[in-house]
Amino acid sequence: MILNREEIVKALLSGDIGHSECPVPLSTQTGQKNFDPEEQEAFTDWCHKFIGPASMDILLGPEFLIENTKSGRKMDDTTDRFFVEPSGEKSDPKSQYRNVSPLEADKGRAPFCIGPLRRALGRSSAIIQLSNTLCAQVMPRLSADLWGLVTTPSFVDPGAKGHLHITVENKTQRLFPIQTDIPYCQLVFYKIEKTEGYTGYYREEEAEPWTAERLLPQVLTSQS
């Protein structure tokens, strides 16, 4: 069952959905029945801004991993662990990514831009947590698709907690500036009856450094 707007709000208040940037009223966390008016107003405004009829908008954080591509490089047809150089030699994908922290536009400097027909691996600005009775999908937003920025759909397991890893791809022939205050994707939540919960690599990851060196070795291990 897909959660609608009312059910998403209830899940935020009950703690079944955790969102580190959502101003959930403290009164709900302490068991009080009456909301503080200012807290209620802040929570209501946030819900109106980020929660749709059956989804929640997600903002990208300020860090990305981008490919250090060279002319002629492509993915190997037999395995996605290595890239094929123009010379025919294979190279480790860890060397093809680098960390990028975009400059803040509100400080008078340019935002991070994805090059034409290039992609970057980003992550949500907020830490997302799901109870063992919910799972979710990261889905593109039509408005971003129309602009030429495509986000790859992905699945969020029950019980997961951490920043969501989100791949974005620039399908245009121009530089695409990434703004951290614009939602390029959304979360759709599903209710499930029973599960053991997620216990994998991304559980409780928010305190860990987020680098290509940390991420990709685990990806390669899971594919071996």
Image (cartoon, rainbow, N blue to C red):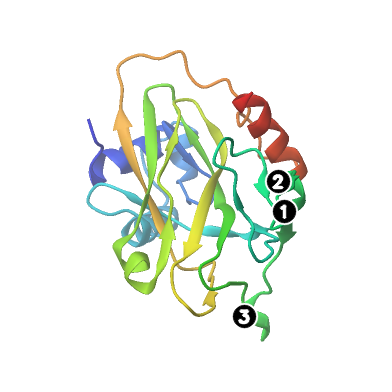
In the figure, residue 102 lies in which quadrant?
Answer: bottom right
x, y percent for residue 9: 32, 43
Q: Residue flagged by tag 3: what amino acid is it? A: Asp
Q: Residue flagged by tag 2: what amino acid is it? A: Pro
Which residue is drawn at the image coordinates 35% and 35% (left, top)?
11
Which residue in the protein does label 2 denote? 93
Q: Which of marks 3 and 2 is nearer the N terminus?
A: 2
x, y percent for residue 74: 59, 53
State the SS at label 3. Answer: helix
**How far apart in space, not on screen, are marks 2 and 1 (Cα)?**
5 Å
**Other-residue count near label 3 (Cα within 10 Å), few / some / many at <14 / 14–19 / ≥20:** few
State the SS at label 2. Answer: helix
Picture disc at residue 106: 3
**Other-residue count near label 2 (Cα within 10 Å), few / some / many at <14 / 14–19 / ≥20:** many
Which residue is drawn at the image coordinates 67% and 61% (left, top)?
69
Q: In this view, does 195 lie above or below 95?
A: above
Q: In which quarter of the image is the C terminus?
A: top right
Q: Residue flagged by tag 1: what amino acid is it? A: Gln
Q: Which of marks 1 and 3 is nearer the N terminus?
A: 1
Which residue in the protein does label 1 denote? 96
**How far apart in space, not on screen, are marks 3 and 2 (Cα)?**
34 Å
Q: Left or right: 147 with respect to 89?
A: left
Which residue is drawn at the image coordinates 61% and 32% (left, top)?
202
**Which residue in the rendered view is the most extreme toward the bottom?**
108
Q: Are marks 1 and 3 in contact (CB under 8 Å)?
A: no
Q: Are marks 2 and 1 in contact (CB under 8 Å)?
A: yes
Q: Could you say which is closer to the camera, residue 143 or residue 223?
A: 223
